[in-house]
Image: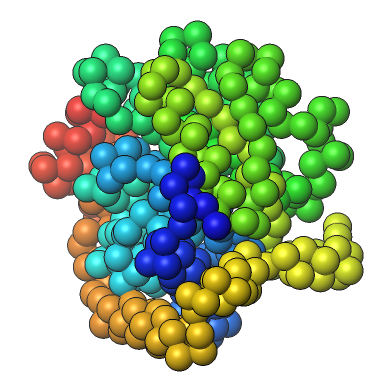
Amino acid sequence: MTAGASPLTREHGLLLLREMLRIRRFEEKTVELYSVGKIRGFLHLYIGEEAVAVGAMQALTADDSIVATYREHGQALARGLPAGALMAELYGKANGCSRGRGGSMHFFDVARRFYGGYAIVGAGLPIALGLALADKLQRQPRITACFFGDGAVSEGEFHESLNLAALWRLPVLFLCENNLYAMGTALDRHQSQTDIRRKADAYAVPAEAVDGMDVLAVEATVRRAAEAVRRDGAPYLVEAQTYRFRAHSMYDPELYRTKEEVERWRQRDPIPAFAAALRAQGWLDDAQRAAIEEAVAAEVAGAVREAEEGPWEPREDLTKDVYTPGALSSERSGTGPEPGGPCGRPEHNVRIEAAK
Ligand SMILES: Cc1ncc(C[n+]2csc(CCOP(=O)(O)OP(=O)(O)O)c2C)c(N)n1
Ligand SMILES: [Mg+2]
């Protein structure tokens, strides 16, 4: 087995397995917590796609920037955002990575150069370009990896971003997670050209596809692509062909695909497939697997504890960072500042003025 150009070591193989299991078990717990109302709002699970985030993240350095989508739990965990801060964010607690204000779709961590989490399909693409442009102007050696779904390729932002990144030679690694569906719409129902690499051709961006259910293949491909972006200071696109095993989000009757299709893809689940490969190599046995599961379970339990024990944002902070004057109903009802006038709190007015 190889990881990129070099042979795979046992240590690295076990790390890849553990990282995929961290995402799987974290998300399985979120399903439980959602069903009892601890987590509310939108929740898009990455289950089935773990090999993409885990493989790709191996090829990136801590100094590179990451931009993801609303299905970003996997990228955030693989990037090293603490599981407790993510779970607390899902709970809406103030110790969450976005202070409980973003929830599932808006994980953010500037210190780890994790720049979202976006609810709008395709919204991360121009932001990735902005980050890469800033790096280019400041002669920073880092690259920006931008994850997006197959649904985003029908957005104008995708085409504008590929064009500008190529034209201005920006160090962006475009990582398309093609799971064949955009909500309930299959790729071949919204694209006349379903080979996503050929769209990159149109903008002179080199591109390749990879089996997104094979963590080693993803790592090797993204390593090659990331090296090209670093070397050439120009964009590259990788299309990871993958599948989500669960519904689009928690509310989705899945009428657009058959149980047989889902079952076929489940046979290619990246976790058991990779675990079997490690076993065949003599690198994994039952005891080792149990130890990994135990460590992952302890991490998830710790994350839930942090979320449970975390504080709610105090009521008086509710309009903090809200730029709209009169956002509180008390303000509208006349007990607050003039309707339409500046916020009653001087420190907030500074921000309101700055935002004008
Ligand atoms: C601009 C925009 N249009 C529509 C939506 C509604 N919407 C939410 S998710 C989604 C599907 C996106 O699919 P894809 O990019 O393939 O990502 P996946 O959910 O498969 O990971 C759509 C259409 C949205 N959030 N933003
Ligand atoms: Mg999709």
| Above or below, 17 relative to 166 | below
Q: Indicate the quadrant where residue 322 lies.
A: top left
Taking the spot 41% from the left edge, 50% from the top edge, the residue there is 58
Residue 276 visible in the displayed image: yes
Report x, y in % for residue 121. Answer: 59, 40
Residue 271 visible in the displayed image: no
Q: Nearer the viewer, residue 300 or 349?
A: 300
Q: Residue furthest left?
A: 346
Numbered label tally: 0
| Above or below, 243 relative to 148 | below
Taking the spot 46% from the left edge, 53% from the top edge, the residue there is 7
Taking the spot 65% from the left edge, 22% from the top edge, the residue there is 200
Taking the spot 86% from the left edge, 57% from the top edge, the residue there is 256
Left or right, 274 with respect to 165, comes to right
Quarter of the picture holding the N terminus: bottom right
| Above or below, 325 relative to 78 | above
Quarter of the picture holding the C terminus: top left
Q: Indicate the quadrant where residue 51 lies.
A: bottom right
Q: Nearer the viewer, residue 247 or 1?
A: 1
Q: Indicate the quadrant where residue 120 lies.
A: top right
Report x, y in % for residue 33. Answer: 50, 81
Left or right, 79 with respect to 186, comes to left
Report x, y in % for residue 272. Answer: 63, 74
Report x, y in % for residue 161. Answer: 53, 21
Q: Residue furthest top?
A: 167
What's the coloring here? rainbow
Q: Nearer the viewer, residue 167 or 218?
A: 218
Left or right, 196 with respect to 120, comes to right
| Above or below, 272 relative to 140 | below
